[in-house]
Image (spheres, rainbow, N blue to C red):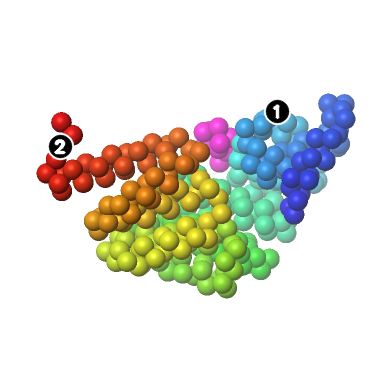
């Protein structure tokens, strides 16, 4: 499940008659299939009735770890369905179940997702507190890579609060933990944060270098487009309009409609600025 989630999903799909499973087997199947779909980014296939089978079964047994995991995935499902109150309660219930266990990785994840919900509600102090608890649990199992993610999350909150020195400190701490691990998925987002800090401080050339590095290391197509947006906006600010145009055109290739819309909006503003510089008009 953790190393080859695609293989796990394939094996689960090969089960001939899952509807005939009962009791423990039914609960284990429900939990494993939910996990596999989650790890393969198939959120649209998730069913709350499926995971509730696991929740109902494990809550009646002393298996706290599986009960906590089931509640965690139910919370994730509710958050994706824009039900933050239900999601938060599921996360808190999961934490209560796992409180006296040594399932530290799951507790770290729960705190992370609680942090996301608090961040979305502009409850920044609470979000930072949750991310710090994630750091605490990850350090207990010496998972330094995950700690880098939690530092990234705190840096994001610091940016939202316009606390640029704090954002820069946490982003650099995250980079230091990676120890030149250029393959890490968190690396590009840390570089982007440092670029946003430099842009806010007016150091555009350093910001450009960070955004370019983020683009170089990012492997996810749709995420790269966001970095091109940051880079293009800098080029537009310093008057390098052709470079800005090329960056915004890269965004049009995104699979996300709102990203494409943003690209066209920036291209419109860019053309408007070019015409203003040339004394022209759209009218």
Separation (CA) of disc 2 from disc 1: 58 Å
Residue beneath the point at 72% across and 59% down: 102
Dot label at residue 281: 2
Q: In the image, is residue 83 part of the stretch drawn in magenta? A: yes
In depth, the one of 35 and 71 nearer the eye is 35
Please state which of residues 68 and 179 is positioned toward the viewer in this rendering.
179
Image position of 50 with respect to 64: above or below? above
Is the C terminus in the top left, top right, bottom left or bottom right quadrant? top left
Location of residue 71 in the rendering, given as x and y in whole percent from the top left corner: 67, 41
Name the main secondary structure of what is drawn in magenta: helix
Q: Is residue 242 visible?
A: yes
Task: Give the residue displayed 32% in from the left and 66% down from the top.
Answer: 205
Please give the range of residues in magenta. Answer: 78-88
Image coordinates of residue 180 in percent, x first then y, are: 56, 72
Q: Name the residue tied to disc 1.
A: 49
Mark 2 crowd level (few <14, some 14–19, many ≥20, 10 Å Cα): few
Quarter occupied by residue 89: top right
Name the spot of residue 150 as percent of width and height, x first: 54, 59
| 163 sits to left or right of 58 | left
Residue name at image x 64 percent, y 54 percent: 107
């Amino acid at each position: 499940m953790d190393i080859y989630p695609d293989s796990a999903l394939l094996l689960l799909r090969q089960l001939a008659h899952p509807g005939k499973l009962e009791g423990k087997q039914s609960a284990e199947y429900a939990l494993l299939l939910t996990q596999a779909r989650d790890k393969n980014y198939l959120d649209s296939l998730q069913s709350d009735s499926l995971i509730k089978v696991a929740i109902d079964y494990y809550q009646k047994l002393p298996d706290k770890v599986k009960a906590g995991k089931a509640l965690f995935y139910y919370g994730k499902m509710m958050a994706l369905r824009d039900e933050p109150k239900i999601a938060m309660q599921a996360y808190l219930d999961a934490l209560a179940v796992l409180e006296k266990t040594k399932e530290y990785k799951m507790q770290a994840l729960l705190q992370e997702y609680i942090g996301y919900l608090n961040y979305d509600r502009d409850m920044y102090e609470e979000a930072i507190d949750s991310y710090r608890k994630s750091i605490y649990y990850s350090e207990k199992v010496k998972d330094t890579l995950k700690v880098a993610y939690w530092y990234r999350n705190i840096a994001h909150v610091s940016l939202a609060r316009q606390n640029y020195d704090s954002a820069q400190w946490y982003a650099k701490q995250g980079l230091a933990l990676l120890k030149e691990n250029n393959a890490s998925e968190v690396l590009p987002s840390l570089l982007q944060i440092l670029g946003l800090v430099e842009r806010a401080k007016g150091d555009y050339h350093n910001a450009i270098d960070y955004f370019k590095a983020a683009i170089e290391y990012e492997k996810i197509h749709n995420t790269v487009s966001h970095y091109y947006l940051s880079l293009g906006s800098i080029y537009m600010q310093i008057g390098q309009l052709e470079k800005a145009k090329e960056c915004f055109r890269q965004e049009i290739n995104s699979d996300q409609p709102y990203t494409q819309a943003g690209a066209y909006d920036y291209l419109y503003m860019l053309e408007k600025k070019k015409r203003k510089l040339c004394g022209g008009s759209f009218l």
